[in-house]
Image (tube, rainbow, N blue to C red):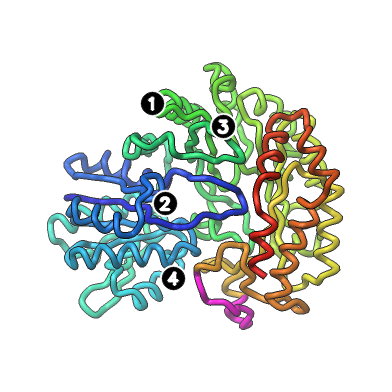
Amino acid sequence: MKILFIEPPKGFWFIMGEYLPPPTGILQLAAYLEARRPQDEISVLDCQAELIEWDGMEKRIISYDPDIVAVSSLATCNTYTVIRALDTAKKVNPDIFTVTGGQHFTALADESLKEYPIIDAIVRGEGEETLVELVTKLETAQSLAGVKGLSFRHVDQIIHNPRRPLIEDLNTLPMPGYHFVEDHMSRYHFKMMAGDRVYAIVEGSRGCDHHCTFCSQCSFWEYRWRTKTGKRIADEFEYCKDNFGAEFLWLTDDNFTFSPRTIEFFNELNSRNLGDELQWFVQARADDVVEYSHMIPDMKRSGNNWVLMGIESGSPETLEDFKKGIKPGQAHKAMRILKQNDIFAQGTFIIGNRKDTHKSIEGLQYFIDELDPDLAIFMILTPYPGTPLYAEAEKNGWIEDRNWANYDMIHAIMPTETLSTRQVQEELYGCYRHFYGSITRNLRGYFSSNPIKKKTYRYVANKTLLRQLKAMI
């Protein structure tokens, strides 16, 4: 069988500056399929890295002449680009079997198959084993009725097979499939974080056992946390460095849970001297940073110099409403711990909760002034399909915008009890203007002794973030 994985042309989230991430999801799927079915011809077309627009993508589909086209679907805001890519494949050859998956299409499998007839199948949830079984069935022209985790169209019916159990041992997964995009590895970058260094993504774990109401990752991975061993994660770091020249790695765990495997991971990196050769970035919870503060010095020595924490709010009531499971005081402690270890400490914050007012959002700004993160990212509360927030918003009629392209956390989708969507949009601009418009903060960043902070603020100073946000109002 000939399978073509596609990362279609799309825009990027300008809040984080210039970046081009590798298409981690389809690289993982392609590597797994290759390991299980070495007889297949498998290619990955990353239109972003290859600077290919829609007409060029169509020509590549024609040239490759695939049996199956699988399109990457990272987030709800990419829904229409996925549909356009699948539609292009069908226009090239109606006999091409089209498939997608990911969080959005998993949550809305039935609605998507009804609305978009160019989708032949949706892989719900974890995709590796389902995809292998799907390809095997298609090759032998067998019924798809027994493929767990698959939703598909059969004649004029839409069929949803039972869910597929999650893979228990993630260490059985193959190494990341960067060999599929080896010719343009040097094009992957994250300018604000990594400058011009070659940038790669490594998956150390999947899922999260917390229950944040707005998080689509939690429900997608069934509120479970599964991890690779510390040694295996270090092996992947080394593999990316030695084989593809990676210098900056994003350990893309939904939640970097501190545990015995964390100590093993740090020790492995340090024993191989990888902490001197690689820099890496991770997302972590504030309460974990506080509880496991004794591990932070080893984390720094192992090459970590940037941590992002989802702090979200300084209001105990809002954090409770989000079911976040942290307290504002823990955010203050975690920020001090990271800074004491010279680790760049970034925070994300959410506005647009139902109880939010102009005054409460102003209070968030003052909370952040006291917290003093090295960098702040503000987002608007967005009801992603599959989340408890989405179910609640649907039930109560809060959703005013049904354009999936705007589900990017910087467009207001819902009003609050006292603020219209336009006012929420204005408040987002106000938060960014308050933080990034501070002359004192910018000067401290511009001349910081922390090289990451200094580089980041000099990068941000040359960008038009506030102008772009103001244009959205």
At horizontal 38% and vertical 55% (from top left) the residue drawn is 72
> Which of labels 4 and 3 is toward the front?
4
Coordinates of residue 24 in the picture (x, y in percent):
43, 45
Q: Which residue is mark 2?
A: 166
Q: From what the image shows, is residue 404 above or below residue 9?
A: below
At horizontal 79% and vertical 30% (from top left) the residue drawn is 340
| The C terminus sits in image quarter | bottom right
Residue 85 found in image quarter: bottom left
At horizontal 44% and vertical 70% (from top left) the residue drawn is 108
- For marks 4 and 1 on the same chain, the one whose residue lies earlier in the sequence: 4
Q: From what the image shows, is residue 146 above or below residue 20?
A: below
Q: CA distance from mark 3 to mark 2?
A: 20 Å
Give the magenta-colored segment's residue range: 393-404
Q: CA distance from mark 2 to mark 4?
A: 19 Å
Q: Pointer 2 and pointer 1: residues touching (CB < 8 Å)?
A: no
Q: Residues within 10 Å of mark 1 (few under 14, many from 20)?
A: few
Q: CA distance from mark 4 to mark 3?
A: 35 Å
* Label 4 residue SS: loop
> Which of labels 3 and 1 is toward the front?
1
Q: From what the image shows, is residue 45 above or below residue 107?
A: above
Q: Which residue is mark 1?
A: 243
Q: Which residue is mark 3?
A: 261
- For marks 2 and 4 on the same chain, the one whose residue lies earlier in the sequence: 4
**At label 2, which amino acid type do we have?**
Leu
**At label 1, which amino acid type do we have?**
Asn
In the rendered structure, the answer to whether residue 248 lies left or right of residue 349 reads: left
